Image (cartoon, grey):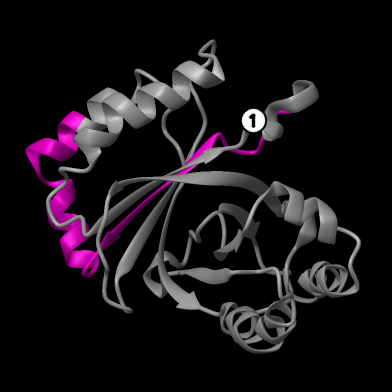
Amino acid sequence: MIKTFNFFKRRPELSVERFREYWLNQHAAVIRAIPEVRKYVASIALSSSYRKDHEPLYDGISEAWFDDEETIVRIAGSTKLRAAITDDAVFVDTSKAGSIVTHEAVQKDGTPPTNAVKTLSLLTRKAGMDVAAFQSYWRVHHGPLAAKLPGALRYVQCHVLASGYADGRTPRYNGVAEVWFDNFDAVRASGNSEIYEQVRADESNFLTVPFPVIFATEHRIV
C-alpha cells in the first residue's frame, strides 16, 4: 500500500469555510467515485491556525491510499481520476499545489480519537545528505526518539518513494511526519518536555530546519 499527499491552498476568492465545505461535500463525492482509492483522508488546518496577520502554508492536505504505484499509473488517464483533478481547480489554487507519493513507516501505533489533533511536519533532507542516508537516519535514529514524545498517540513517517527521485527529480518534500495528540493542549504540553528538546536538537543532523508544520484534524472521506 502506498499513500499520496496533495498539498492544498484555497483559491484566493474563497473563504476558509467555503473551501472546507466544498472539499468535504462536492469534491468528496468525486473522490468516492474512484474505486482504486482504498482510503482518503482530508487533513484540514485548525481554525486556530488563522490569525489576523498569518495563516497556514496550506489550508489542508489530502492523503489517498492505493494498492501500489502501478495502480496510479494505470488509472492516470481514467475518466474518474481526471474528473477529480479537474475538480481540484474549483476550490484549490493549483499554482500553489503540490504532491508526493510515499510509503508509511509506523514508529508508534495507536488509534487516536476522531477529533484528535494531528501535526504534519513537511520535511526536506539536509543539504548534501543523500536520500538513502536521510531515510535511514530518520527511520532508525530519529524515529524511536520522536516516538517517545509525551502525549503522542500515533507517529507515522511517510517516505517519498524511489520513483520520486528518478531522472534527477526533486520532490516538493522528502517526507511527512505525522503525529496525533488528544487535543492542542497535549501538543503544547509535549512541546514543553525534555524529549521534545532532544527531538529538536536532533533535527539538524538530517533535516533542513526550520520546516513547515500544519496542525489539523482528520476527516475520513473513503
- Please name the residue shown 42% across and 33% down the image: 210
Q: Is residue 137 left or right of residue 32?
A: left
Number of marks in the rendered image: 1
Q: Position of residue 104 (x, y in %)?
A: 46, 47
The stretch drawn in magenta includes residue 182: yes
Residue 65 at what x, y percent from top left? Answer: 58, 61
Location of the C terminus by quadrant is bottom right
Residue at 72% x, 53% y: name it. Answer: 96
Q: In this view, does 39 lie above or below 71?
A: below
**Observer-nearest residue: 219 or 185?**
219
Q: Mark 1 points at which residue?
A: 162
Position of residue 76 measured from the top left corner of the image (x, y, whole percent) = 85, 58
Q: Which residues lie in the magenta part?
A: 169-198
The outermost residue toward the top is 128
Residue 123 lies in the magenta stretch: no
Name above or below for residue 142 compared with residue 98: above
Note whether residue 32 is visible. Answer: yes
Residue under the point 52% across and 70% down: 41
| Residue 181 image point, x, y percent | 24, 63
Q: How crowded is mark 1: few (under 14 residues within 10 Å), some or many (20 or more)?
A: few
Is 216 positioned to the left or the right of 103 in the image? left
Along the line of sight, the residue nearer the viewer: 85 or 3 = 3
Q: Quadrant of residue 11?
A: bottom right
In what element is the residue under mark 1? Answer: helix
In the image, is residue 18 above or below residue 75? below
Q: Which residue is drawn at 84% across and 75% down?
A: 80
Q: Can residue 208 be seen in this view?
A: no
Quadrant position of residue 199: top left
Name the one closer to the observer, 84 or 54. Answer: 84
Three-letter code for the amino acid on which mark 1 is drawn: Ala
Which residue reaches farthest left? 194
